[in-house]
Image (tube, rainbow, N blue to C red):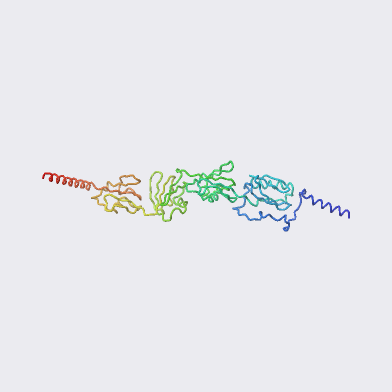
Amino acid sequence: MLKFLVLLLAVLCYGADDDKFTAVVPQFQSQDVKFQRNTVAQEPYDLEQVIDSSYVVGPGDFFEILSPKGFDVVQVSPEGNISVPSCGVVTVDKLSLSEAKAALKNMLVSKYDERYVQVQIVRMRKLQLSVLGAVAKPGHKVMNPQTRLGSAVEAFGGFQPLADKKHVKVYRDKDTLDIDYTLFESMGVDEVNLMLHSGDVVYVPYTTSEGSIAISTPVSSYTVSFVEGRTLGEYIDKLGGVVESKIRWAKVKKPDGSVSTYELADARDLRLEPKTEVELWSNEPFVYVGGAVTMVGKVPYNPDYHAIDYIATSGVSIVTGSLSRATRVRDGKRESIDPYKDDIKPGDFIEIPRSIYESVKDVTLFLASLLSVVATAIIISTY
């Protein structure tokens, strides 16, 4: 009987000192409160994808710890530390997820058998992000974790037409990351659409006029960033709904000053150069004809017409009009043209001066009238 009491006392003392025993095997029973998961761990969390081990841990993150003592959910403190009951404190601020988990596990295995220790992140903190520059709604927002650059820009209203996407900057602590976001848009390079960290500041610069395309519509004007190889149709599509569906014509002014007019359907595949100016309109374009013609006014533009066609449409007589002295006024400049060869663009003004015969006849008639008046005056004065 005495031996039995001694053995019982030894077992009780052994159990009371279990905190010092590293090989305790837990009996995980669902009805045991200490092995029931905290509500933070049970709450579903909407993540873009599996958490990458390079995720940087910071204040506000929650970790779940499984040990022979049960489940514990701990939070990274504002100082960047995690306090584990009965084990101690470990600093995890600015460590990668894999480094933070390793630090926690190393502390736990000093007390418990490694076979019964598990560490996992169960909730990531919200991101504090600032997006500034050429975005529709620059400012500061609290964003979901694992937010990528493109999603952040969209949350701030998206890129403005004048945004220089080739030189986006991400300021992270003391580092500056230079991002060419066009590589993600055009080629789908995922590394460019990087995962943002809490505290990141994204700056989207405005493009310069040397690297831009000017597009005007009947409603407004826009300046968009030049992208190598992008077509007129792609630039228009990037403007979204600001370009009305009734647009039919495009006037393209190249950097060298040359101007061409197209039906929009024929110009969508046109690749533009930097500093190109594009004018879009929906109304039927006209050419104006004046001078020695029967019908002075505007004639509907036809890309296949030369000046002689517009002149003939307006009605001209080779007796009254001088085709050899026809002129064209474009952008405020008057120049002589060959009516049979030179091109005509919408908005041009063609003028046909009177023929020399008509001009001389007019002078002769004027002089005759003047002499008649003088003669009449002399006759009256003699009476």
Q: Position of residue 371 (x, y in %)?
A: 16, 45
Q: How many marks?
A: 0
Q: Position of residue 302 (x, y in %)?
A: 35, 53
- Classify residue 202 as left or right of residue 348: right
Specify the quadrant that holds the C terminus. top left
Q: Looking at the image, which residue sits at the far right? A: 1
Q: Is residue 85 visible?
A: yes
- Front-lying residue, 266 or 375: 375
- Classify residue 233 as left or right of residue 171: left
Specify the quadrant that holds the N terminus. bottom right
- Classify residue 141 as left or right of residue 252: right
- Classify residue 193 as left or right of residue 381: right
- Front-lying residue, 239 or 317: 239
Q: Position of residue 174 (x, y in %)?
A: 58, 41
Q: Is residue 309 visible?
A: no
Q: Looking at the image, which residue sits at the far top? A: 174
Q: Looking at the image, which residue sits at the far left? A: 383
- Front-lying residue, 60 or 150: 60
Q: Position of residue 159 (x, y in %)?
A: 50, 49
